[in-house]
Image (spheres, rainbow, N blue to C red):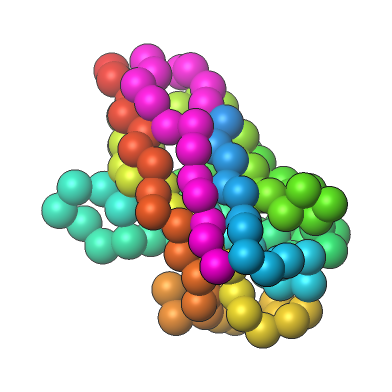
Amino acid sequence: VQLQASGGGLVQAGGSLRLSCAASGRTFSTNAMSWFRQAPGKEREFVAAIKWSGSNTYYADSVKGRFTISRDNAKNTVNLQMNNLKPEDTAVYYCAADKEPRGWGTTKTKLYGYDYWGQGTLVTVSS
C-alpha cells in the first residue's frame, strides 16, 4: 500500500497550490482520509479530513476558509486546494488514510487515527 503526495512547491504569499495524493495497493473508498503538515522544528499537525463518502469535511481553524479538501473515490485520490497561502503555511504536507472502514470520529484529527501515510510534499510560502 502506498500513498504518493505531489503538488508542493514554492509560492508567494497570497498564492495558491493544489496538492494531490494518489493511493495504490488497495482502495480507500470506504476510509476517511486527511492531510497533516509538519513545519521545521514543530510537531506534525492536523490540517483537513474528509469522510469516506466525501459528504463531510473538517478543517483546522488555521486553514478554514482558505483550504478545501476533496476526494475522487473512482481514482483513489484525495486533494487539497490551498488558497491565500501564508508564510506560516510553510511545511511538509502529508496525506494519510484510516484503515477502519466508514470511520469518522474524534480520532480524525489525531495522528494515531491514521494507519497509512504518504512520504510528504514540501510547500514553501515566501513573504
Does residue 110 appear in the picture of this structure? no
Q: Nearest the camera: 111 or 72?
A: 72
- Residue 48 in picture, x, y percent from top left: 57, 55
- Residue 45 in picture, x, y percent from top left: 38, 60
Task: Left or right? Give the position of 90 relative to 51.
Answer: left
Residue 105, picture quadrant: bottom right
> Which quadrant holds the C terminus?
top left
Q: Is residue 123 above or below residue 4?
A: above
Q: Please give the name of the residue rendered at 58% of the width and 60% of the height, measured from the top-left corner.
A: 34
Q: Please give the name of the residue rendered at 84% of the width and 63% of the height, measured from the top-left corner.
A: 53
Task: Left or right? Give the position of 78 relative to 44.
Answer: right
Q: Nearest the camera: 110 or 92?
A: 92
Q: Is residue 123 above or below residue 50?
A: above
- Residue 95 in picture, x, y percent from top left: 51, 55
Does residue 43 appear in the picture of this structure? yes
- Residue 32 in picture, x, y percent from top left: 68, 69
Task: Left or right? Give the position of 15 relative to 125.
Answer: right
Q: Residue furthest front?
A: 25
Q: Nearest the camera: 52 or 29?
A: 29
Q: Please give the name of the residue rendered at 43% of the width and 32% of the height, measured from the top-left corner.
A: 8
Region rendered in magenta: 1-17
Taking the magenta stretch, the answer to whether it contains residue 9 is yes
Residue 33, picture quadrant: bottom right
Taking the magenta stretch, the answer to whether it contains residue 57 is no
Instruction: Give the number of callouts.
Output: 0
Q: Residue furthest left?
A: 41
Q: Is residue 93 above or below residue 89?
A: below
Q: Please give the name of the residue rendered at 49% of the width and 38% of the height, measured from the top-left corner.
A: 6
